[in-house]
Structure formats: C-alpha cells, structure tokens
Image (spheres, helix red, strand yellow):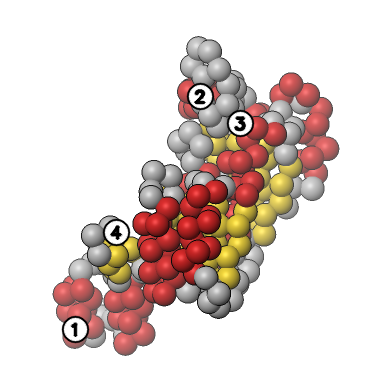
Amino acid sequence: MLPNATLRDVLRLYRNGELSEGETLAAIEGLRIEMVEGMARIDAGRSVRCGMPEVVLAEGKDPATLAEIMVTHLAAAGRCIATRVSPEHVEAVKARIGSSDIRMEYREAARAFVLATGSAPEPRGGVVAVITAGTSDIRVAEEVRLIAEEMGCEVRTAYDVGVAGIHRLFTALKALIPAHVFVVAAGREGTLPSIVAGLVDRPVIGVPVSTGYGYMGGGEAALASMLQSCSVLGVVNIDAGFTAGAFAAQIANLVAEHE
C-alpha cells in the first residue's frame, strides 16, 4: 500500500490487480473524512488506517461545538473519545445525546469520556504498565490508561511510587513485570522514568507532567531530565497522555501478535 495514498491511487492499484477487493475497501474506509459544517473535518478512517481511535481534544472548544463534533464522529465510527474535557463539555454532550441509545462513559480522573453505540474494543493481547511518581500525576496516567484500553490492551497500574520514597517502587514492580511496555508519568524533577528504565527489560516511555513550581516548573524540568536520561528511554511531550497511551498500545499489541 502506498504511504499517504489518495483515492485515485487506491483505485489505480485495484485496477492493476495490486490490491484485492477487501484491501481496496479497507483503504477507502481509511481515507474517509466527515464534515461538521463550518467547524471541523473528522478523520473517520483513522482506526482503519492507523490502528488507533480518533480522539477529540476538548480543551479550547466551545461545549456545543464539541457536542456536534462528537455526535458526528460517533455516527461515522460507532465509538469516539474526548480528552481534556470540562464539566461544561460533559453537560453539553449529555444534553445533545438526550435519551438516545448512545452510551457515555465519563472518566473524571482522566478528564475524558467515551461515546459508544457499539461494543467495547476487543482485547488484542497487549499489556501496558502505567506508573506515576505522585498522586498529582494520576490525571495524565489515567488518560494513558483510557487510550491503551480503547486500543484493546490490558492496563496494570502502580501509582505514587516516586523517588521521595523509592522503596515503594520495588514491590510495585513485581505485579507489573509481565507488561510488554511501561509508561511512567512524573512531574517535578522527573527522575522516575529513568530509574524504571534501568530496572526492566521492556520499552519505557516517560511522560513529563506539569507539576512543580519555581525554576523550570510546569513540567519543563521533568522534560529536560527525561531527555537527558542515561537509561534507554522514550519521551513524549508534557502531559501528553494520549500520545504515550497510543504509542504504548501499538508496541504492546505488536508484541502480543508475535508471542
């Protein structure tokens, strides 16, 4: 399949016998765009094309606009996720869906919700471990958890095991060792991901969290620390729970397929 293929490319490949009918249908589905007039272009084919759900960032969006985007996406995909939601966003979406058969799962800790008309994601075998340094990092960790679960992973967690009481980490790791990949969220000086990466033989993804204050506060010190890690560590942007969760799930599911 051509990278960034257009519909014309897909049809040409089918005509030349390079794609089967099923492959062609999947490719066309992966190119679908749904329009919310005057507001948004929804990538309805992302799950087919990339293997991950389309997630709507609620932050900065008018609540009524978010509600229209979510309902349009739900009609196209049967399931959709909104992150960084406010109570006003939640209420606007509840009012928009009314008494319909749309199910809404609101995860307050993750500041996110899922709308669905179909079944839950099928398990794909991947196991993701999510660790936080402190309780202030849980909001980002729960976003990681939601995305990984929506991509069919089992998620195991260990929260509040940071370096201020490092002995807490060692017992917590025992239950997490079967994981295919670790996601470690930490604010302040952001040391914990480097320590975990030096203890396990699995990929580790560090998520700097916007906790901390003073010089290089707001996650900047944590990001700098993770980028300078002497352990082998992948790093995403500050508070990027969606990115970390999706990346971890891709790794875990790929490993599970080959076990």
Point out residue 186 in the picture as x, y percentages from the top left corner: 61, 31
Q: Residue at x 17, y 79 (%)?
A: 12
Q: Residues within 10 Å of mark 3 (few under 14, many from 20)?
A: many
Type of residue at label 2? Gly
| Disc 4 versus disc 2: nearer the observer | 4
Q: Which residue is mark 1?
A: 16
The disc at residue 186 is 3
Q: Is residue 71 in view from this perspective?
A: yes
SS category of the residue bearing label 4: strand
Between label 3 and label 2, give the one nearer the viewer.
2
The quadrant in which the N terminus is found is bottom left
Please tell me how crowded label 1 is: few (under 14), some (14-19), or many (20+) other residues with Cα within 10 Å. Answer: few
CA gap between label 4 and label 2 equals 30 Å
Disc 4 to disc 1, C-alpha distance: 35 Å
Quadrant occupied by the C terminus: bottom right
Q: Which residue is mark 2?
A: 218
Count numbered badges in the picture. Answer: 4
Write down the residue under mark 4. 40
Circles 2 and 1: CB atoms closer than 8 Å: no
Which of the two labelled residues, at mark 3 and mark 2, occupies the earlier sequence position? 3
Tag 2 or tag 4, which sits nearer the N-term?
4
Is 3 situated left or right of 178 in this image?
left
> Who comes first in sequence, dot 4 or dot 1?
1
Q: Residue visible at 80% across and 44% down?
A: 174
Is there any visible trace of residue 226 in the rendered image?
Answer: no
In front: label 4 or label 1: 4
Please say if the residues under marks 4 and 1 sit with CB atoms less than 8 Å apart: no
Q: CA distance from mark 4 to mark 3?
A: 34 Å
Comes first in the chain, label 3 or label 1? 1
Q: Which callout, 2 or 1, points at the residue further toward the start of the chain?
A: 1
